[in-house]
């Protein structure tokens, strides 16, 4: 329920008040048919008030954890971008050492030079923030469109929020100034005499110690590996879900949901109308088979009850199973294999003995895996009523129930004709050939011939399965995009460092070539630096990825957070791309002419 608070009341005060009222409300509304154990759980419920200023949506519950992970991923990409920015500014500061030294020598103050360098960083921040603000609106709408479907449209307010914009802009300014400050300080700390003396090309870098630029590149590699491992985990998890055995074939199955609310058929008349509609739908051209079902698999709907196998009562057993109702031809329509016994037929009526068809997990859990056909179980009943005895007449293959992610549950199917309280609606599944659109056009007049007041809704079972994986698709798409972006940034950073190293060691490389070093030796000399940086970054990245993977464990399917295949694939991918990027500067170094390299000596 939704309401508006009285003046002077807060959400916290309303919540406290509701908590105090809850025991009395639950006691007054306790259904008399509840068993003692069920009543105990019901009475323990508490009413709570929450802030509804931004609306009420199940998206918070479903997407809260994935979005926190994506926020952390965004932070890692930001760190990688900052490290790249710092590297670029350090390289720029190195190139401008002589310029800055001359300006210091002729009287420019260090503070004035710092202000100029920081102003350049600020200009980068303003340009980046402006571009980001434009992209944010477009990409956010694309993100919502990715989560929205025709059957489940999604609305998220995406109007400009000045608090978010101010936070993002402030963060961009802060990062640019912070990562621009270190290069500016480093550039202005060098004395003019030292800078002028080092200006010639004769100064060889030799085996330089790990400088700030090397540390930044190693950090980029480590964080990029973490994001690539995460992307591979989510992509492979989605693949596992798409290829998991669901126990039925969804392709070519059309779901037809009918609403009898406006038709106002009495309860006694509904079963006959359902049979008439089934015969009409099954006779349509393009329909291979048709069947009625209470709810389709992987729809999120279901019901469970305690049962008592082989003569024990459900109350004494306390063993739970999950149930559905289906009509004749249901398992054939969904291509679910019948392993033993029979399917439901026209002899299973309201007046005939109660029967059920169970799946393999049901047989294993309650009958030790033996053939359950012919065995019986009692079904939980309302308080004061006898528990009905159900005979098992068939055994079918395991199928998913609520979602694809779950393990196979113990499921029992009852004949839909034995439903003592048929609802004001019906769902039919049709296995079809040809165009579903043409069949929809044929279904409408067939249903209207029974009653024009019956509402109709169509849905593809394949589309229903795909929609159940929207969260997994979102995580796979976004983590994959972030992982590739991070890998690209890290590769650019490594390329920049290797190119800078080659430029600084140009004279040394020229001397080596003049003394007889061949092309391969020079290439290996340059690539050794890249391999060293990669080794340090990848080692740190593997450790961080194994630690961080635990946060995503609940979102994975069929994988462990420390999955070795994903880890090795990410390391190999990042290594290959990074070495390929480093090969360009190495090849240029190997092609240097000694006289050209030494002419500036």
Image: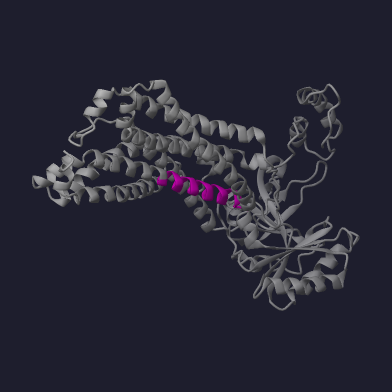
Q: Residue at x 66, y 72 (%)?
A: 432
Residue 284, compared with residue 83, is above or below; it is below
Q: 383 and 64: which one is in front? A: 64
Q: Given the current orientation, which residue lies at the most extreme front position? A: 106
Residue 463, compared with residue 87, is above or below; it is below
State whether the magenta stretch is mostly helix, strand or loop: helix
Snapshot quadrant of residue 498: top left
Snapshot quadrant of residue 391: bottom right
Q: 185 and 387: which one is in front? A: 185
Specify start and end residues of the magenta stretch as a single range. Answer: 468-488
* Image side of residue 291 versus residue 29, left or right: left
Residue 114 visible? The answer is yes
Q: Position of residue 569 (x, y in %)?
A: 37, 49
Q: Residue at x 40, y 26 (%)?
A: 113
Q: Position of residue 138 (x, y in %)?
A: 61, 49
Q: Residue at x 43, y 34 (%)?
A: 547
Q: 554 and 91: which one is in front? A: 91
Residue 486, compared with residue 445, is above or below; it is above
């Amino acid at each position: 329920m939704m309401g508006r608070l009285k003046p002077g009341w807060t959400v916290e005060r309303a919540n406290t008040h509701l908590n105090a009222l809850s025991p009395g409300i639950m006691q007054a509304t306790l259904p008399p048919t509840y068993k003692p154990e069920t009543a105990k759980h019901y009475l323990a419920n508490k009413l709570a008030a929450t802030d509804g200023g931004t609306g009420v949506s199940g998206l918070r519950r479903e997407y809260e954890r994935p979005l926190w992970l994506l926020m952390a991923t965004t932070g890692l990409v930001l760190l990688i971008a900052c490290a790249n920015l710092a590297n670029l500014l350090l390289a720029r500061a190195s190139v401008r050492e002589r310029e800055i030294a001359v300006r210091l020598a002729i009287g420019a103050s260090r503070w004035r030079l710092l202000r100029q360098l920081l102003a350049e960083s600020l200009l980068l921040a303003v340009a980046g923030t402006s571009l980001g603000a434009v992209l944010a609106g477009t990409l956010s709408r694309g993100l919502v469109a990715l989560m929205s479907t025709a059957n489940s449209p999604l609305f998220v307010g995406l109007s400009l929020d000045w608090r978010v914009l101010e936070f993002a802009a402030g963060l961009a300014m802060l990062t640019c100034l912070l990562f621009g400050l270190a290069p500016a300080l480093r550039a202005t700390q060098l004395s003019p005499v030292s800078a002028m003396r080092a200006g010639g090309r004769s100064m060889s870098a030799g085996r330089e110690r790990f400088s700030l630029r090397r540390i930044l590149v190693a950090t980029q590699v480590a964080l990029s590996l973490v994001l690539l491992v995460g992307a591979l985990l989510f992509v492979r998890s989605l693949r596992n879900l798409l290829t998991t055995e669901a126990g039925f074939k969804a392709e070519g199955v059309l779901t037809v949901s009918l609403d009898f609310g406006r038709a106002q058929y009495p309860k006694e008349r509904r079963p006959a109308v359902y049979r008439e509609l089934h015969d009409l739908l099954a006779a349509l051209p393009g329909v291979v088979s048709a069947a009625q079902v209470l709810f389709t698999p992987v729809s999120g709907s279901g019901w469970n009850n305690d049962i008592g196998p082989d003569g024990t009562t459900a109350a004494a057993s306390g063993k739970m199973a999950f149930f559905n109702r289906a009509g004749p031809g249901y398992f054939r329509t969904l291509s679910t294999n019948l392993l033993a016994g029979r399917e439901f037929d026209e002899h299973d009526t309201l007046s005939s003995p109660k029967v059920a068809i169970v799946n393999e997990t049901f047989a294993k859990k309650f009958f030790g895996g033996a053939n359950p056909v012919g065995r019986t179980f009692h079904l939980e009943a309302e308080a004061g009523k006898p528990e009905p005895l159900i005979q098992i007449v068939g055994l079918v293959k395991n199928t998913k129930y609520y979602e694809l992610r779950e393990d196979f549950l113990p499921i029992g199917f009852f004949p839909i004709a034995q439903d003592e309280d048929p609802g004001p609606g019906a769902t039919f599944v049709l296995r079809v050939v040809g165009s579903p659109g043409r069949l929809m056009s044929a279904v409408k007049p067939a249903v209207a011939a029974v009653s024009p007041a019956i509402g109709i809704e169509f849905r593809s079972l394949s589309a229903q399965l795909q929609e159940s994986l929207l969260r997994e698709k979102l995580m796979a798409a976004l983590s994959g995009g972030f992982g590739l972006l991070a890998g690209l940034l890290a590769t650019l950073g490594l390329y920049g460092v290797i190119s800078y190293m080659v430029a600084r060691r140009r004279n040394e490389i020229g001397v080596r070539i003049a003394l007889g070093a061949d092309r391969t030796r020079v290439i290996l000399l340059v690539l050794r630096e890249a391999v060293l940086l990669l080794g340090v970054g990848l080692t740190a990245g593997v450790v961080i990825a194994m630690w961080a993977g635990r946060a995503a464990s609940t979102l994975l399917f069929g994988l462990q957070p420390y999955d070795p295949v994903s880890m090795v694939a990410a390391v190999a991918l990042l290594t290959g791309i990074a070495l390929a990027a480093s090969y360009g500067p190495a090849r240029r170094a190997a092609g240097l002419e000694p006289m050209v390299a030494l002419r500036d000596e």
